[in-house]
Image (spheres, rainbow, N blue to C red):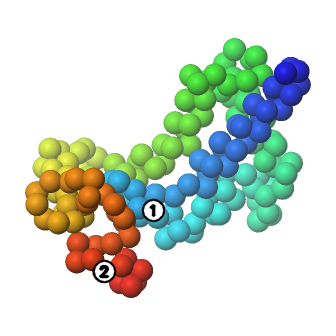
Amino acid sequence: MKKSTKLLTAASVIVLGIATVAGTGMANSRWGGHGMQQHGGHGMRMMDRFDSNGDGKVTAEEMSAARDKAMADYDSNKDGKLSIDEFQGLWLEHMRSRMVRAFQHIDSDGDATITQAEMTGLMQRMMSRMDRNNDGAISKDDMRGSGRHHKDGDDHKKRR
């Protein structure tokens, strides 16, 4: 493979990765998070991240500029590509806001620490949601259709 083809492929993967990170929400997360759609959606996050001139539109040029900045910021050895270690920095930067939201969700008293009791509460909520047959254990059978049905068998969409 030609060097230019490799660089183009790497750049495409990076843009796809950035767009994916920018566009993903927390809907149906294992930690009980709330979807980004409730807070303006992934489109708004994309606008915040890529609309550099604030005109309410994201152009190919703005996305290219974001890609170029990410490469410049995270390609520590300046070889024109990101290794897994270099990509980790980019990934963590984009995921930090999710981590903070998850932390705040678990920190029920808002004191900026997570206690054993708060973590226990999270685990109990997870067990309650996932143990569909109420046998005190989460099995593969409980996981089938997870997120679509409640314990009583009603379809989630019917409850909305």
Q: Amino acid at mark 2?
A: Asp
Report which quarter residue 145 is drawn in.
bottom left
Secondary structure beneath label 2: loop
Q: In the displayed structure, does residue 142 sit left or right of residue 41?
A: left
Outermost residue on the front side: it is: 141
Q: Residues within 10 Å of mark 1 (few under 14, many from 20)?
A: some
The residue positioned 22% from the left and 53% from the top of the image is 139
**Where's residue 66, x and y in %?**
75, 42
In which quadrant of the rendered image does the C terminus lie? bottom left
Instruction: Give residue 27's mark.
Output: 1
Which residue, given by chain and number where applicable, does mark 2 sit on? 154
Q: In the displayed structure, does residue 143 sit left or right of residue 133?
A: right
In which quadrant of the rendered image does the N terminus lie? top right
The residue positioned 79% from the left and 33% from the top of the image is 9
Q: Amino acid at mark 1?
A: Ala
The residue positioned 40% from the left and 56% from the top of the image is 29
Residue nearer the viewer, 44 or 126: 126
Could you give the CA–CA distance between mark 2 and mark 1, rounded to whole angstroms? Answer: 19 Å
Specify whether residue 7 is in view: yes
The residue positioned 25% from the left and 44% from the top of the image is 113
Q: Residues within 10 Å of mark 2 (few under 14, many from 20)?
A: few
**Where's residue 132, x and y in %?**
21, 66
**Where's residue 96, x and y in %?**
48, 43
Instruction: Give residue 4's mark.
Output: none
